[in-house]
Structure formats: structure tokens, C-alpha cells
Image (cartoon, rainbow, N blue to C red):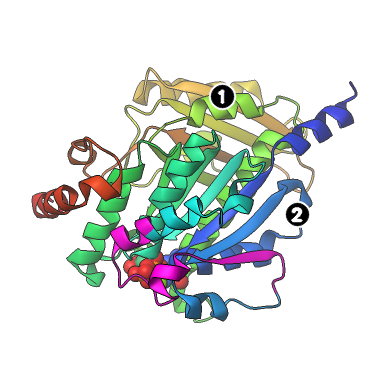
Amino acid sequence: MSEENTKNTRRDHIKTGLIGMGGGGGNSLMYVYERLHQFSFLNMEYFVLNTDQQALDFISKVEVNVTKILIGSKSLKGLGTGAKPLVGYRAMKNSIRNGELDAVFKDKSILFLSAGLGGGSGSGGIVAIVEEARKRKIITLVFGTYPWKFEGPKREENALLSLRSMYKIADSVIIVNNELLLENTNEAGSVGKEDMFWKANEFLKHIVLTIPNMIMQHSFINLDYNDFKNAVAQSQFGFFYVQEMYPKETLYEAFLRSFPKSLDIANAHDIIVNFSGRKGIVTLAKINEIFGKLNKLNPKINVLFGMSYNKNIPKGIIKFSFILTNVQYNFINKATLDDTKNPTLQNEYKKLMAKSKKIIKKK
Ligand SMILES: Nc1nc2c(ncn2[C@@H]2O[C@H](COP(=O)(O)OP(=O)(O)OP(=O)(O)O)[C@@H](O)[C@H]2O)c(=O)[nH]1
Ligand SMILES: [Mg+2]
């Protein structure tokens, strides 16, 4: 089979979907859609799901390629959940049962799910979607924002409830702590032209663009879909980053700069990295240096890497993107999350609520 054919076959088999759930999830989806929908290699379908009719109406009607689905229309009548995850979860279960989400799951290999955690529609609905996707053997990569402290304990409780219910059934859950977005407000907000979610939305855009790119585009050392699938399968919490070296910086320095303080990689299982740059710039010596040092931080880590040439990257610069699996976020107490016996919101709701209060107190 020629190289071109291999490429096409791979693409044809990997159909992806991006789902924005709830108000925040829907907005982040639109941000990504506007910037990426022209990239046909993503082979992606876009869906916005909400229990709130008004929020769905707000999404521009011009975007014909975004499918909007009102969740729980019979029980909630398009009026939202009142910030109750259990209500969002049940509404989504019903909609799935009624076949209203068949198009979302149909033929998909990977689903990217985005929600602002802390409310009811996104936090609860996402759990039901992940459960269904798992039944259908679809890889799920969840992207969620963790609420700001100023939004109050109830929002954090909802976010924790959602996380503890899904982090073991999703393949990988990547969380951006909104609190950390405040650290660089200059970049994110002070210009006035971007809203406060700009950084989180950009992050989602990179995930959605880079992961299919890593596994579907031809590079001279390939990462294939099955490598990716094996590494991310049930990898609990994950971390993803795209980085570019500063001039005069070493590749390893750029690499270290990518890790936020809130991340513990000592027990991470895998790292999947794709390097790109001009011909000859990505040498084995440089890669060896990175992984040699990374090995000291985590001797057990499994390394998967790919390399590709890109003549559009400036001379002397290497760009790379990576996914770490099984990381620990310092702002989420995973040991307490692990107490859950039954991972569904429906059965555990009361117990979880009591426990998530304890989690908040412990911090
Ligand atoms: N990325 C992003 N996050 C948002 C946005 N708006 C709100 N959020 C965050 O997402 C959390 C949940 O809010 P919503 O998305 O409005 O809630 P929902 O999922 O629609 O749930 P209900 O409205 O309670 O049914 C908030 O606590 C914020 O932290 C947004 O436009 N973009
Ligand atoms: Mg809402």
C-alpha cells in the first residue's frame, strides 16, 4: 500500500467528535469550531448539548455544521438544571435512551468532551456521555475547567462530584484550573479583546487540533492510533501541552517550562510526544537528553514519540506537543476521590455530596 493510501485509510477509520456540554462547554466549542472547522483532516463533527434552550438559541444559526441538541426536553422543558448535576445526569441518560444522541456516537473513534465544571448540565451530563461512550468502546478525552474559588463552594462541590463520577470511566480527563488562569491575566485578559475564558478555550483548541494531528498525519517516525489508544485508555487524569522553544533555549529547558506547579508527574504512566521542526533540527541526541532527564523524575515512564518535518517552523526552533497520562493534579485530592464505590451520579449522589464537602474542608 502506498504511503498516501495508508494515510487515507487511517483517516477514514478515525472519525472524531467534539461535544460542548452546558453553557461553558458550548461556548468553548464555538471558539474551537470557528478556528478549526476548515481543517478537514480532523474528520470531526461538532455538537452542542444543553438543557437550556435559551443558551442553545444564543449559538449562532449561521453555524450550520454545529448540531444543537436540547437535553431532557420533556422533563426540563428547556429551562436548565438549576445548577444540579444529578438533574443534568438524569436528563442526559433519558436523551441517550430515547436515541436523541445517536448521531453523537455514530461511527466515532474518539470523542472530545468539553464542559465548564461547576454547574448542572455540563457537570452531570458529561458523566452520562462518558458512560455511554465507554459502552460503545469510543475513546473519551474530557476537557473540563475547574471553577474559580470566588464562585463559591457549591460550584467546587459540583465539579468534584462530576470528577469523581467520571475520572475512572473516561479515558483521560484533562483539567484546567480557572484559578491558574488568573496567574497570567496580562496575557489572558488585560488586552480587553479576549474574554476571561480565552486561555482555557485556546487550550482546548490545541488539544483538539494536535491529538488527531499526532496520530493521523504522516511523520517520519510515526505515532499510530493504537499506540495512542493503549496509552490513554483509562489513564484517569491527563495533562497536555504544546510548547515551542525560545531562541537560545535548549529543548529540555522548553520541556521543563511546560509543567505547571500544580502537576505531579512522579507516577505518570506514559508520555506521548511529537516533535516538529526543520529537517535535521530534531536530533536523537536532543531527544535522548530530554528523556534521560525525564527518566530521573520518573524512572517508570513509558515514552512514545514521533517526529515530523515542518519547514514553516523558524530555523533553530523545535515545536512539540505532549500528553502525559495518569498524572496527579495538586488541586484535586485524588485519594479522596478514590473512595467512590459506584461511579455513577445516580446512586451515589447523596454520599458523594457529603464526601465532597469533606474534600473541600480538608484542603
Ligand atoms: N470555558 C468556559 N467556562 C465557562 C463559561 N461560562 C462559565 N464557565 C465555567 O463553567 C462553570 C459551569 O457553568 P455553566 O457552563 O454555565 O453551567 P452549565 O453546565 O450550563 O450548568 P447549568 O446551567 O447549571 O445547568 C462555571 O462555574 C464557570 O467556572 C464559558 O463561557 N467558557
Ligand atoms: Mg447552563
Give the percent coordinates (x, y) of residue 69.
56, 65
Residue 238 visible, this orientation = yes
Say which residue appears at 76% left-offset and 47% top-offset.
41
Q: Nearer the viewer, mark 1 or mark 2?
A: 2
- In the image shown, does 230 or 71 lie closer to the viewer? 71
Where 304 sits versus 252, above or below? above
Which badge, 1 or 2, comes first in the chain's sequence? 2
Query: Label 2 near label 1: C-beta < 8 Å?
Result: no
Q: Is residue 49 left or right of residue 128?
A: right
Give the percent coordinates (x, y) of residue 331.
25, 49
Give the percent coordinates (x, y) of residue 257.
44, 44
- In the image shown, does 46 or 286 lie closer to the viewer? 46
Give the percent coordinates (x, y) of residue 92.
43, 57
Kind of residue sitting beneath label 1: Leu
- Measured in 3D between alpha carbons, the distance from the residue under mark 1 to the one under mark 2, in whole angstroms, is 25 Å
Q: Is residue 254 left or right of residue 93?
A: right
The residue beneath circle 1 is 304
Say which residue appears at 26% left-offset and 52% top-offset.
160
The residues colored magenta run: 63-90
Kind of residue sitting beneath label 2: Phe
Crowdedness of circle 2 by 10 Å Cα count: few (<14), some, many (20+)?
few
- In the image shown, does 202 or 107 lie closer to the viewer? 107
Q: Residue extending furthest right?
A: 2
Quadrant of the image occupied by residue 267: top left
Crowdedness of circle 1 by 10 Å Cα count: few (<14), some, many (20+)?
some
Q: Is mark 1 within 8 Å of ligand 1?
A: no
Mark drawn on residue 39:
2
Ligand 1 occupies quarter: bottom left
